């Protein structure tokens, strides 16, 4: 499956926002805070970004934050468009239901990229079945746990000792002793980061 393999810090600088793509490193060693200007040669006075450019920037911020390629992101948008309600809110709810995002939200990983790797390597179980598909859509009542063999590795042991300080969103629950999460309910727009301007994303695809 295709994925972005370039420099993550350049994405934050290009889109003019801190996207938290490296997890804890974005707090301790943030390149965007040191060099907030876009990458590449600085040719004097910056031009004003057009409305179309702002729509593209907002779309890219959502796409890069969730770690999707354009083709995959368009499929999620088309699915959100077919559902009743506000398309932009539907899109974010669908993205939140991805397994890699849930693993990240439960605190099993510092970033969505790391969560994706954990899922792809077969460490995660959904309802006691190994699931190595990052785009798997969780449902209400699903239980997210670690494979028994994975609980013996060093990463799991370190995670078990640091998970206490993690904050869990209201639509999720986590047994911090057994490291087993559960989907209490499907996420609502209020549970999703509000920093994204989803109206601009809808406008971009509605041209």
Image: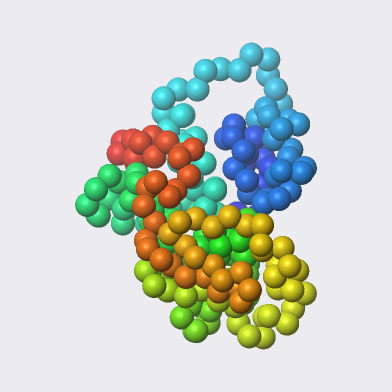
Residue at coordinates 39% horizontally, 56% vertically from top-left?
A: 187
Camera sees residue 132: no
Relative horizontal placement of residue 70, taking residue 188 as reference (left or right):
right
Q: Is residue 78 above or below residue 178?
A: above
Question: Relative to residue 31, is residue 82 drawn left or right?
Answer: left
Examine the rendered structure and indicate whether residue 179 appears above or below residue 195: below
* Residue closest to the far left: 84
Number of marks present in the image shown: 0
Instruction: Point out residue 18 in the picture as x, y percentages from the top left corner.
Output: 62, 38
Residue 15 sits in quarter:
top right
x and y percentages locating residue 142 in the rendered image: 42, 74
Q: Position of residue 95 (x, y in %)?
A: 43, 56
* Color scheme of the displayed model: rainbow
- Please identify the quadrant where the N terminus is shown: bottom right
Front-lying residue, 22 or 151: 151
Q: Is residue 201 left or right of residue 122?
A: left
Q: Quadrant of residue 34?
A: top right
Seen from the viewer's position, the closer of residues 107 and 199 is 107
Residue at x 63% of width, y 85% of height: 148
Q: Residue at x 33, y 51 (%)?
A: 90
Residue 187 lies, with reference to residue 63, above or below; the image says: below
Q: Taking the image as drawn, is residue 149 in sight?
A: yes
Q: Residue at x 37, y 69 (%)?
A: 140
Q: Quadrant of the C terminus?
A: top left
In the picture, residue 146 is in which quadrant?
bottom right
Nearest the eye: 40 or 169: 169
- In front of the other: 5 or 103: 103
């Amino acid at each position: 499956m295709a994925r972005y393999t370039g420099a993550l810090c350049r994405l934050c600088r290009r889109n003019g926002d801190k996207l938290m793509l490296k997890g804890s490193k974005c707090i301790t060693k943030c390149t965007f805070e040191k060099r907030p200007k876009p990458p590449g040669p600085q040719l004097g006075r910056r031009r004003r970004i057009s409305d179309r450019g702002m729509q593209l920037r907002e779309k890219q911020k959502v796409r890069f934050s969730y770690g999707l390629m354009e083709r995959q992101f368009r499929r999620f948008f088309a699915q959100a468009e077919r559902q009743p309600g506000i398309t932009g809110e539907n899109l974010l709810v669908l993205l939140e239901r991805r397994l890699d995002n849930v693993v990240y939200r439960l605190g099993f990983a510092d970033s969505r990229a790391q969560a994706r790797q954990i899922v792809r390597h077969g460490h995660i179980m959904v309802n006691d079945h190994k699931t190595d598909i990052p785009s798997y859509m969780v449902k209400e009542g699903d239980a997210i746990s670690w494979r028994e063999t994975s609980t013996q590795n060093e990463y799991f042991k370190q995670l078990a000792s640091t998970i206490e300080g993690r904050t869990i969103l209201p639509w999720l629950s986590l047994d911090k002793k057994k490291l087993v999460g559960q989907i209490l309910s499907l996420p609502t727009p209020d549970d999703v980061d509000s920093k994204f301007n989803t109206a601009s994303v809808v406008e971009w695809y509605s041209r």
